[in-house]
Image: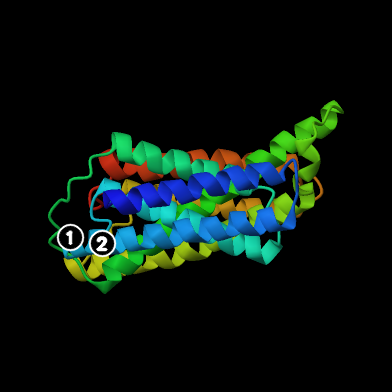
Amino acid sequence: MPIHLGVLTIALYAVSFLCYARILYAPHVWLGRLATLLLFGGIVAQYFALLQRSHWTHSVPYDDLYGSMSLFAWLLGLTYLGLEILHRQRSVGAFVTLLLVAWITALGLLVPTVVVPAPPARGPLFAFHVTLNTWAYAAFALSFVFSAVYLVQDRVLRSHHPGAAFWRFPALDVLDRMSRSSVRIGLAAMCVGVTSGLIWRHRLTGAYSWGDPKVIVTLVILGVYVAYLRLSRTAHWRGARAALLCAINFIVVLFSYTFVNVYLTRFHRFF
């Protein structure tokens, strides 16, 4: 990520976080709108940073780990912004923007930014596959945030000792709806992304590679999230149990995004 655009992106996300955190204590309408506007500004700045990286590599901007993690952060912010507008709820914005700031800061400090040569097999279908799967990971990350806030809020309610900021959090049913919306987005993106990836692989090698560890783990992830959507509407699982299942499945998503991508899969570089 270009230095000036990287600094601008982090600055906008950081100030947005401060505004979101403040409205937990002082819910001024203008402050909430400012937080959303700053988040939008950070998303725009990061978009141009990705475009600049694409210009440098003469390819898609996510041919390496740094680029893929940058795309993940951008899609995370963009998806949350859409959900915030859809559900008209800003109370969890502080948690999402804090995650964005921490992610991008760690990315700049820990992950090499060296631009690597593009892979030999590219094309629109490959780019489509990678973008959709990264979008799915970002949506699942949001569902984890919503589920984690749900579990914390549920525990605080049971303790009968809520703090002042607690009352600014969304109602449990709102968090539940936002989590389900995130999972639906992730499922749709991953289903189409996996399908396009299998087609791309078949065109490249003449085989679908169903036995690859990446494909197997992805199918497990999809199955658990489908079960979550089903169980979250039943009386026995509705609420904290469904939120816990969603949060635990995200650990599998992280395992797939990191360990499986780097060490186990035979035909993925980082995805």
Q: Residue at x 70, y 62 (%)?
A: 87
191 in relation to 97, above or below? below
259 in relation to 77, above or below? above
Determine which residue is flagged by label 1: 56
- Mark 1 crowdedness (10 Å alpha carbons): few <14, some 14-19, many ≥20: few
Question: Where, by quadrant of the figure, is residue 197 drawn?
Answer: bottom left
Q: How many marks?
A: 2
Q: Do the residues under discs 2 and 1 have CB atoms within 8 angstroms?
A: yes
Determine which residue is flagged by label 2: 52
Percent across and percent down for residue 96 are: 56, 46
Q: Can residue 193 be seen in the rendering of this structure? A: yes
Nearest the eye: 19 or 77: 19
Nearest the eye: 242 or 83: 83
* Left or right: where 91 falls relative to 109: right
- Amino acid identity at mark 2: Gln
* Secondary structure of the residue carrying numbered label 2: helix
Q: Can residue 145 be seen in the rendering of this structure? A: no
Percent across and percent down for residue 40 are: 51, 61
